Amino acid sequence: MALAGGLLMGFAVAGTAIVAFVHQRTAERIAANEAAATRALIHEIVPAGSYDNDVVTDTVTITAPEALGSDDPLPVYRARRDGQPVAAVMTVVAPDGYNGAIKLLVGVRDNGTVAGVRVVRHQETPGLGDGIEAARSDWITQFRGRSLQRPQPRQWRVAKDGGTFDQLTGATITSRAVVRAVREALVYFRSHRQALFARKRTD
């Protein structure tokens, strides 16, 4: 009886160790995949040759619900060359998409112009709202080179609302949400640029 009990306990301990090991390896693999996907999107926004630091690890975490659209802390990835700021790639949430929140990466150059925007995650309607994805249309590229002076803040709207930006056909709500989120990211960057690049890295 004691032997059987010991064997059962041994199996239980071994099983727990195996589960813990698999969980740890799975978590590490997921983290590595997410880092690789993030790095790929950042390279689409800020060309790799324009900075010389590890932009994925040179991050700070920001909590700014009104500006960045989420109560959760969000990472900002900082690109530098020879120690000088090149761009900040901000994680931004458009909370008012047609089918829910839209998570974005918004790259802002040191001079306040948009380096690029990419969609990280969304639940928008296939064939309509999913046109915000760079792989499905070039709609998202219209933000490149824009700033709070080009166009003026009141023109940071979709064309249907009298603004500068085209809206996706059949997905005006989605388009409005993204335009608004990018504008808010620029406003936040303008007010916090020095602090974003001066803050110590968040590990």
Image (cartoon, grey):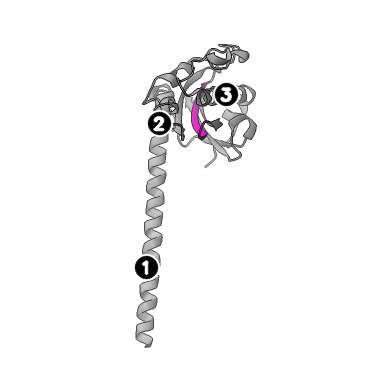
Q: Position of residue 43 (x, y in %)?
A: 40, 27
The kind of secondary structure element at disc 2 is loop
The residue type indicated by label 2 comes to: Pro
Q: Main secondary structure of the magenta part?
A: strand
Farthest residue to the bottom: give it: 1
Q: Which residues are magenta?
A: 98-109
Q: Mark 2 Cα within 10 Å, few/some/many (few <14, many 20+)?
A: few
Q: Mark 3 Cα within 10 Å, few/some/many (few <14, many 20+)?
A: some
The kind of secondary structure element at disc 1 is helix
The residue type indicated by label 1 comes to: Gly
In the rendered image, the vertical position of residue 122 relative to residue 112, given as above or below: below
Image-quadrant location for residue 70: top right
The residue type indicated by label 3 comes to: Arg
Mark 3 touches mark 2? (CB < 8 Å): no
Q: Is residue 51 left or right of residue 201?
A: left
For the point 54% across and 40% down, the residue is 202
Q: Position of residue 118 (x, y in %)?
A: 45, 27
For the point 63% across and 35% down, the residue is 65
